[in-house]
Amino acid sequence: MSETVLLVGGGGREHAIARALADSDADLYACAGNRNPGIARLADGFESLDATNSTAVTAYAEDVGATLAVVGPEGPLAAGVADALEDAGIYAFGPRRDDARIETDKAFQRRFMEEHDISGCPDFETFDDVEAACEYIDGYDGDLAVKPAGLTGGKGVKVIGDQVTAEEAKAYLRDSDYDRVVLEERLVGEEFTVQALVANGQLRVTPAVQDHKRAYEGDEGPNTGGMGSYSDANLALPFMTEDDYHEAVDVLKATVSALGDYRGVLYGQFMLTADGVKVVEFNARFGDPEAMNTLPVLATDFLDVLVAAREGEDLPKLSFASKATVCKYAVPEGYPTDPEAGAKVAIDEESAGDAILFFASVDERDDGIYTTTSRSFAVVGVGDSIAAAEETAEDALSIAGEEGLHVRHDIGTDDLVQRRVDHVQELRTGG
Ligand code: AMP
Ligand code: GLY
């Protein structure tokens, strides 16, 4: 039976999901607030709607006769879009709102880890009173990460001793209107992501990826949703061992088993520290950009995973091409603090050369493709080594031009990768 899949969301991650489904035996429909030209070209129908509006999404799903849905971003999951689709009898690959709290409520997430004795949890305290949190900062011996409990698009966390001083962190809390915050031990090390496809109590893991949160080259500047990322031709990354990777997978396994009947993607953000692998956070969806590294090398038909999930069957074992990937985002000048929207984007699939082009938060109108205030498009190079993949991504960017856009050209370069390797070496030897 052929399937009709509704894809919810219009970013780079969703373009990667659409591409993964495009060659399957599925009719693809998509809906999002922005008209993503990459998704629109792959889909039989594209509806512009607010993807957090459960009623509108469900009505569109029913309209197109969806037999499956994939919910890409966290916003719709937090709004209960998966629950609404399920109520309408449409299987959604994406957790229900309660299960998505593993991402959407950082206080819940840390307590959950503590209650279920999941390894890798840093010391933490949760607060619903800003002054009590400030007092805790004053009395704490060491650096803390200050994290609003709710969703902030990856931009709400402030790390004392890294981005801010203790005084600045307190001022940040007092000036903002977060009603709940988590304060936790600052983890020092190298970050990496491992994503798992989860359903029916099973999980299938994907290769590790390293994202780059900081806006500017050399890891300077404010945190962003992620400026780009790379993965290697095997499961681990150059700065980590296979054992480190498996330690992270064990954390994901323990989490899935504690969550019960979670379904969708469970994304673990890990920090490889001198004391082993620690959990920075969980997300209830594919990473963006990480999905753009992972899905292009997934050799297993993604639709087969979705159908097995819905049917309550064993999930297929995943296989991956032995290729490295490098993803570089082009974002509006001034992103993330003061982004300039409305620039025309000239790149198209042909001009990306050997790289894969993923459109993100751009909007296609009658007279062209325009940037919004969020990330615009990404190019992904796939190659035998990280260096080869990096070169392919850079070639695409040089052809496309970057007028009005900003790119972190250092992502995936030998220099930056070597710095990660040296950093971990230094931590491990106590240097
Ligand atoms: P999150 O929204 O939890 O992913 O946090 C955004 C970024 O803040 C992470 O990718 C880390 O770079 C940083 N971060 C979060 N928690 C910690 C922590 N406990 N120690 C150090 N850095 C952290
Ligand atoms: N790459 C970080 C995220 O998707 O949250």
Image (cartoon, rainbow, N blue to C red):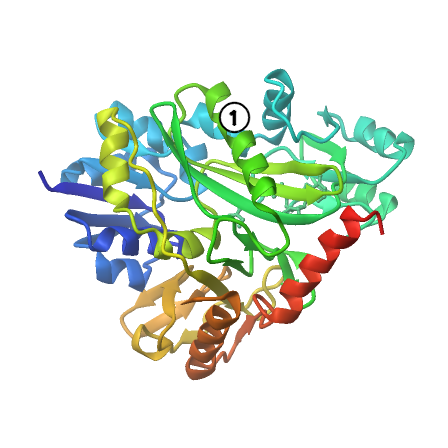
Q: Left of 395 or right of it: where is 421?
A: right
Q: Residues within 10 Å of mark 1 (few under 14, many from 20)?
A: many
Comparing 88 with 235, the one in front is 235
Q: Left of 325 or right of it: where is 119?
A: right
Residue at horizontal 35%, vertical 70%?
369
Quadrant hosting residue 12: bottom left
Classify 95 as above or below 61. above
Q: Is residue 221 visible?
A: no
Q: Left of 168 or right of it: where is 317?
A: left
- The amino acid type found where label 1 is placed reads Thr
Q: Position of residue 367 (x, y in %)?
A: 29, 75
Residue at horizontal 67%, vertical 64%?
418
Q: Position of residue 185 (x, y in %)?
A: 77, 35
Comparing 222 with 27, the one in front is 27
Q: How many marks?
A: 1
Q: Position of residue 11 (x, y in %)?
A: 40, 55
SS assignment at label 1: helix
Quadrant hosting residue 205: top left
- The answer as to whether callout 1 falls within 8 Å of ligand 1 is no
Q: Is residue 126 visible?
A: yes
Classify 199 as above or below 56. above
Comparing 30 with 428, the one in front is 428
Q: Which residue position is annotated with label 1?
A: 255
- The N terminus sits in image quarter: top left
Residue at horizontal 43%, vertical 38%?
196
Residue at horizontal 31%, vertical 28%?
84
Q: Left of 355 or right of it: where is 315?
A: left
Comparing 48 with 125, the one in front is 125
